Image (cartoon, rainbow, N blue to C red):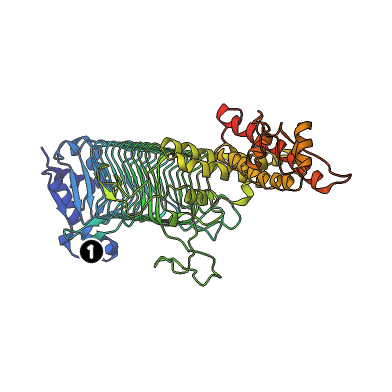
């Protein structure tokens, strides 16, 4: 039987030295190392390689599809290192029964593997042009790592990879289009788009993508790991002066975690709309930058993750975002940690966070720039950028709230209407807050500052909302409910009264509603301070004691009984009959207020000494005033415990 080399000579004679090595080693499963034929080992400089290193693409295709040839290929496959592959390598719709590896090779023309079935495909360290691999089915792993470099689009639409998609240390360069387009790809293992490190932990080969990386609707059985990767898409279809989408993974399903952390850098929008993540979303130490579009109000988002579902936690620690971060309608089973960050805005409208929401150590400029105490907080990578973040929590729901007063947004940059939180996690304490998404979820780190829970501070928090919102009762009612659940009843009254004051000032009450609100505030503190009514009654009685004491001394307040009055008048208003009760100003004043008789008001009466007696009319008017006001105060004070006037 003819050897594989003899068959190759019959088909492709004459063979180059590299092709001879490929034919020889394909039959014994060893690597055909062509780098020994001169010209160096860098595929970026393959133009300087001698012709002896050329391997025709048709020869590789022949090894894969010719029945006689492939029967002699060792099960370990075809391994070619340091060769220059000439011509289009077209393996579309083929069934390659053995591994195919092009290591540190230069593929000069197209690489086409559309619809192909392969056991393993490795392009580790190779330089290629565009790659068309739509519908590719790889039973094992797909290797685009170890300084792999592609000039042009790499397409993997609808591809299937049984194990990992390894792109660590790869470079995908297509700045005017898609660097990597892998919509609806199915990966049984993990997807790696990160730097490769040396044994000493130094970056040996960076991962870079110039152009959009698109993974729409992808399904990943392990992790999506882009830790330390660099993604740039400096071109937008909508504006020549803005960035586009750097990483698009709408509707992606990741069984493990997503890592956009520890040196991850994106120039352009990172999109995770409707994504499903079985583990954590970690963006700690990541930088997300997206220039704003000129006229499009929807543009400029650094991270868009509306409708994302994360079964673990979301970590934005040490995070930088130039452009808003959107998590509208997000569902997070664990925690949402925003800590030690530089950002412009976070929108959590309708988000649902089962665990705690951390908002701490937020870098921002403090106070008015005209204030001599104005302090700039600048990031060294963005020395001229001002940081005054917005936080929108409209209709969001979280388990516990852990925040800091120093990290709250400035006035007008916080929206709390509809925000629901089960409790305020008052500290100092220890909380389960991993510093890294890869740290076990029960790792503990100390919370370094007390979470404010007193009513005065929390009211200042509520009042940071913009004035244009007008009166919104829900933020007050939510704070009241939480304080009650936490047993801080002494703080509830202050918040409830502040709510009614805000309603009075900014609500639509009408003139009668404002009068009613004002009276209820003065009399019983909107039901939370009924002692005000009793204090009012006490003051009325005290003032009345003075008024009626004066009336008695001025002979305007005299006995009601005719015989007693006659004798009293004869004695020049000094003596009473022995049987007649004496006058006591405090008790008379009390008798005016009370609905029952103590014997003073029935025994003594006011008289007009002469027509137009000012003392009489003054005391009579005050007596009527004290009677009416006193009765009102008594009724209102009794209505609170009876439930006719409800708190708030």
- 591 left or right of 293 in image: right
Q: Position of residue 38 (x, y in %)?
A: 18, 64
Q: Is residue 250 left or right of residue 555?
A: left
Question: Which residue is the site of mark 1?
Answer: 50
- Residue 95 visible in this rendered orientation of the protein: no
Q: Is residue 482 above or below residue 152?
A: above
| Dot 1: element | loop
Q: Position of residue 135 (x, y in %)?
A: 36, 37
Q: How many numbered marks, from 0 up?
A: 1
Judge whether 453 appears above or below 40 on screen: above
Residue, x 62% and y 42% (percent of image)?
A: 536
| In-image side of 634 versus 241 (left or right) | right
Q: Quadrant of residue 591?
A: top right
Quarter of the rendering occupied by the N terminus = top left
User: In the image, residue 500 lies at what x, y percent?
Assistant: 60, 42
Q: Nearer the viewer, residue 409 or 221?
A: 409
Q: Nearer the viewer, residue 568 or 56?
A: 568
Question: Which residue does the image show at 64% across and 50% down from the upper left?
Answer: 468
The quadrant of the rendering that contains the C terminus is top right
Q: Residues within 10 Å of mark 1 (few under 14, many from 20)?
A: few
Residue 144, above or below 626 = below
Residue 494 seen anywhere in this rendered image of the structure? yes
* Name of the residue lying farthest toward the right: 611
Q: Position of residue 21 (x, y in %)?
A: 15, 52
Residue 571 located left or right of residue 292: right
> Between residues 163 and 406, which one lies in front from this camera angle?
406
């Amino acid at each position: 039987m003819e050897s594989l080399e003899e068959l190759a000579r019959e088909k492709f004679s004459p063979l180059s030295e590299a092709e001879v090595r490929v034919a020889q080693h394909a039959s014994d499963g060893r690597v055909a190392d062509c780098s020994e034929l001169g010209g160096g080992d860098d595929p970026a400089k393959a133009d300087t390689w001698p012709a002896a290193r050329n391997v025709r693409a048709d020869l590789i295709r022949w090894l894969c599809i010719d029945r006689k040839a492939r029967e002699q290929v060792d099960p370990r496959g075809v391994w070619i290192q340091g060769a220059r592959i000439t011509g289009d390598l077209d393996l579309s719709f083929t069934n390659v029964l053995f591994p195919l590896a092009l290591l540190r090779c230069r593929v000069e023309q197209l690489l086409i593997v559309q619809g192909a079935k392969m056991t393993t495909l490795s392009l580790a360290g190779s330089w290629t042009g565009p790659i068309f691999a739509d519908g590719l089915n790889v039973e094992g792993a797909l290797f685009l790592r170890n300084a792999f470099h592609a000039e042009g689009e790499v397409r993997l639409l609808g591809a299937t990879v049984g194990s990992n998609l390894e792109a660590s240390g790869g470079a995908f360069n297509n700045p005017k289009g898609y660097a990597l387009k892998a919509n609806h790809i199915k990966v049984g293992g993990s997807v790696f788009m990160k730097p490769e490190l040396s044994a000493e932990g130094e970056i040996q080969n960076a991962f870079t993508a110039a152009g959009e990386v698109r993974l729409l609707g992808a399904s990943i059985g392990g992790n999506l790991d882009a830790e330390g990767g660099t993604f740039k898409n400096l071109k937008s279809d909508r504006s020549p002066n803005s960035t586009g989408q750097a990483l698009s993974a709408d509707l992606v399903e990741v069984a493990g975690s997503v890592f956009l952390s520890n040196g991850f850098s994106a120039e352009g929008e990172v999109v995770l709309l409707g994504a499903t993540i079985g583990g954590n979303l970690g963006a700690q130490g990541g930088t997300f930058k997206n220039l704003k579009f000129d006229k499009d109000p929807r543009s400029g988002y650094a991270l868009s993750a509306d409708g994302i579902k994360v079964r673990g936690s979301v970590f934005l620690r040490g995070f930088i975002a130039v452009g808003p971060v959107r998590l509208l309608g997000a569902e997070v089973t664990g925690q949402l940690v925003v800590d030690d960050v530089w950002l412009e805005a976070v929108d959590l409208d309708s988000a649902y966070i089962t665990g705690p929401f951390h908002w701490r150590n937020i870098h921002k400029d403090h106070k008015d720039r005209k204030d001599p105490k104005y302090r700039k907080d600048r990031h060294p990578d963005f020395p001229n950028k001002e940081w005054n973040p917005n936080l929108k929590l409209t209709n969001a729901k979280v388990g516990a709230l852990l925040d800091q007063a120093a990290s709250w947004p400035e006035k007008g940059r916080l929206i709390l209407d509809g925000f629901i939180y089960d409790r305020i996690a008052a500290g100092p304490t220890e909380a389960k807050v991993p510093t890294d998404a890869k740290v076990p979820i029960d790792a503990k780190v100390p919370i370094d500052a007390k979470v404010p829970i007193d009513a005065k501070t929390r009211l200042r928090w509520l009042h940071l909302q913009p004035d244009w919102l007008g009166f919104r009762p829900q933020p007050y009612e939510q704070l009241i409910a939480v304080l009650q659940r936490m047993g801080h009843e002494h703080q509830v009254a202050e918040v409830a009264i502040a709510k009614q004051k805000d309603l009075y000032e900014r609500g639509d009450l009408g003139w009668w509603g404002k009068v009613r609100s004002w009276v209820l505030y003065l009399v019983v503190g909107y039901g939370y301070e009924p002692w005000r009514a009793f204090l009012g009654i006490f003051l009325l009685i005290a003032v009345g004691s003075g008024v009626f004491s004066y009336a008695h001394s001025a002979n305007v307040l005299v006995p009601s009984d005719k015989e007693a009055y006659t004798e009293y008048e004869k004695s020049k208003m000094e003596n009473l009959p022995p049987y007649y009760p004496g006058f006591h100003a405090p008790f008379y004043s009390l008798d005016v207020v009370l609905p029952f008789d103590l014997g003073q008001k029935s025994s003594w009466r006011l008289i007009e000494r002469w027509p137009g007696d000012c003392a009489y009319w003054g005391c009579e008017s005050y007596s009527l005033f004290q009677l009416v006001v006193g009765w009102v105060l008594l009724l209102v004070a009794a209505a609170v415990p009876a439930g006719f006037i409800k708190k708030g």
